Image: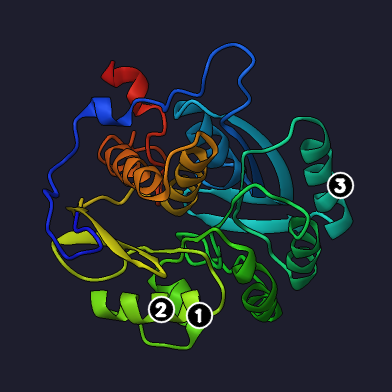
Amino acid sequence: MTDASGRSAAAARPPHPALSPAKSGGEGSKKGRVLAIGGSDSGGGAGIQADIKTIAMLGGFAASAITAVTVQDTTGVHAIHPIPPDVVVAQARAVLDDIGADAIKTGMLGSAAVVEALADLFVGVTAPVVIDPVMAATTGAALLDEDAIQALRARLIPLAALLTPNAPEAARLTGLDVATIDDLRRAGQALLGMGAGAVLMKGGHVAGESVTDVLMTPTGETLFVSDRIAARHTHGTGCTLASACATGLAQGLDLTAAVERAHAYVAEAIRQAPGLGRGDGPIDHGWPLRAR
């Protein structure tokens, strides 16, 4: 990891105790409530299912608003059944008005109508919003309409406390080529210029022996580096990382600490992937239970 001043820190695999859930207080504490908004993955590896597993494993409380029901397994997305935008918003509003949220995380939104409806809702929300600009599944299936990308740029990115694009998503959002770490930085600056409070530029698609995620804010950057794991089973990593970041913020961690814990949690979940399915299988969200 490298801090904003450019000093290098060890990129070694973190000890398991560093991944212990953040303490959210005693009886009566409400810290750690996360509203996850996204699509349902029938295979259980990504989407809302991954969000709920991640939030729970890191000690938060997960609530949800479903944007679409997908027919999905490890070999691909076979059908998508969108939920009407007013129903998506009604789910979210019901949670916010009753349980409340200390952070909100969005994933698959699907259409410009859903993006616009949620942007209207978030204008009145004080909880930090973590936006994972999901555009395609691990298998390549499109999960965001083309006309929704402009709505995402114009309406949701300015409301993001943290935006978490991978390289292909950053390229589509900015129109820039994103193939190197320096490209990640250039795209990240462009996304900050669009109004995001911070961006976590994910480096999994950038070639190299290690994976570098670049956390960028208006005041500097921090690098999170881990060994690249030769693995086929990586389905749901993006959803999981964003949800883990949102959980940390909901629990009161500062942004860098939330991202550091999320990065380490996902890396170990990939290492311990159970090898399920005939295609791109899920990671192991529950690995901390076996690490104790």
The residue identified by callout 3 is: 90
Numbered label attached to residue 193: 1
Vertical position of residue 67 compared to residue 51: above or below: below
Q: Are marks 2 and 1 in contact (CB under 8 Å)?
A: yes
Helix or strand or loop: what does disc 1 sit on? helix
Regarding residue 172, the answer to whether it shows in the image is no
The residue identified by callout 2 is: 189
In which quadrant will I find the N terminus?
bottom left
Residue at far top of view: 27
Relative to the observer, which residue lies in front, 252 or 33? 252
Vertical position of residue 59 compared to residue 10: above or below: above
Q: Residues within 10 Å of mark 3 (few under 14, many from 20)?
A: some
Regarding residue 170, the answer to whether it shows in the image is yes
Q: Choose top left, top right, bottom left or bottom right for residue 272.
A: top left
Residue type highlighted by circle 3? Ala
Q: Choose top left, top right, bottom left or bottom right for residue 216.
A: bottom left
Relative to the observer, which residue lies in front, 161 or 43? 161
Spot occupied by residue 276 in the image (x, y as percentages of width and height)? 39, 37
Q: Residues within 10 Å of mark 2 (few under 14, many from 20)?
A: some
Relative to the observer, which residue lies in front, 258 or 112? 258
In which quadrant will I find the C terminus?
top left
Residue type highlighted by circle 2? Gln
Residue type highlighted by circle 1? Gly
Cα–Cα gap, marks 2 and 1: 6 Å
Q: Earlier in the sequence, mark 1 or mark 3?
A: 3
Spot occupied by residue 210 in the image (x, y as percentages of width and height)? 17, 59
